[in-house]
Image: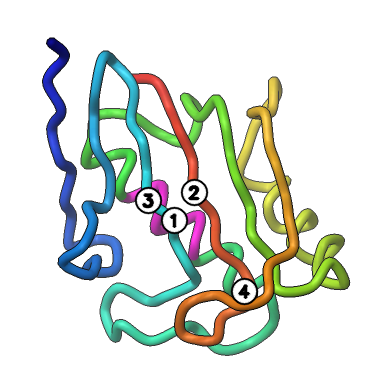
Amino acid sequence: MPTRTAISTTNAPVPLPFFSQANVCNGMVYCSGSIGMDPATQNVVEGGVGDRTAQALRNLSAVLEAGGSSLKNVVKVNVYLTTMENFAAMNKVYDTFFEHPKPGRTCVAVKELPMRTDVEIECVAHL
């Protein structure tokens, strides 16, 4: 039976007690959703969806690094937006974080996200 190891870092926002920042299992890192929260203040960053996209990806990068991986190893991303009107602004920032070949990705609009933010991103990466 495969073992699962929880990942935790202070370089990303502290998760609620219901989930881990990520889990490593069978050579893969499964990251929980990340919002544009500053880990130092535990507040959502101000500005536009691009600012929060960048912070969410920096948070995921920190979690991946704590788990022995990196954004370069991401194979799948799920992006949740509260309105597809933010799609272009999110993509503009998102594109700067990933090299070719880009990971597979799904992007959907949802009714609402935690802390009234407008973007949440989760990913899966290999070690």
Give the CA distance from mark 3 to mark 2. 6 Å
Type of the residue with mark 4: Asp
Near mark 1 (Cα within 10 A), the count class, few <14, some 14-19 or many ≥20, is: many
Residue at the spot 15% in from the left edge and 41% down from the top edge: 6
Give the CA distance from mark 4 to mark 2. 17 Å
Tell whether 61 sits left or right of 93: left
Closer to us: mark 1 or mark 4? 1
Q: Dot 2: what SS?
A: strand
Q: Is residue 61 above or below residue 50?
A: above
User: Which is more N-terminal, label 3 or label 4?
Assistant: 3
Residue 83 position within the rendered picture, expressed as x and y whole percent measured from the top left: 79, 73
Give the CA distance from mark 1 to mark 2. 4 Å
Type of the residue with mark 1: Gly
Disc 2: which residue: 122
User: Which is more N-terminal, label 2 or label 1?
Assistant: 1
Residue 94 position within the rendered picture, expressed as x and y whole percent measured from the top left: 68, 51
Closer to us: mark 4 or mark 3? 3
Residue at the spot 29% in from the left edge and 86% down from the top edge: 41
Determine the image quadrant of residue 75. Answer: top right
Q: Is residue 86 above or below residue 9?
A: below
Q: Is residue 111 above or below residue 9?
A: below
Give the CA distance from mark 1 to mark 4. 16 Å
Disc 1: which residue: 33
Task: Give the magenta-colored segment's residue range.
Answer: 56-62
Q: Is the C-beta separation of discs 4 and 2 under 8 Å?
A: no
Type of the residue with mark 2: Glu
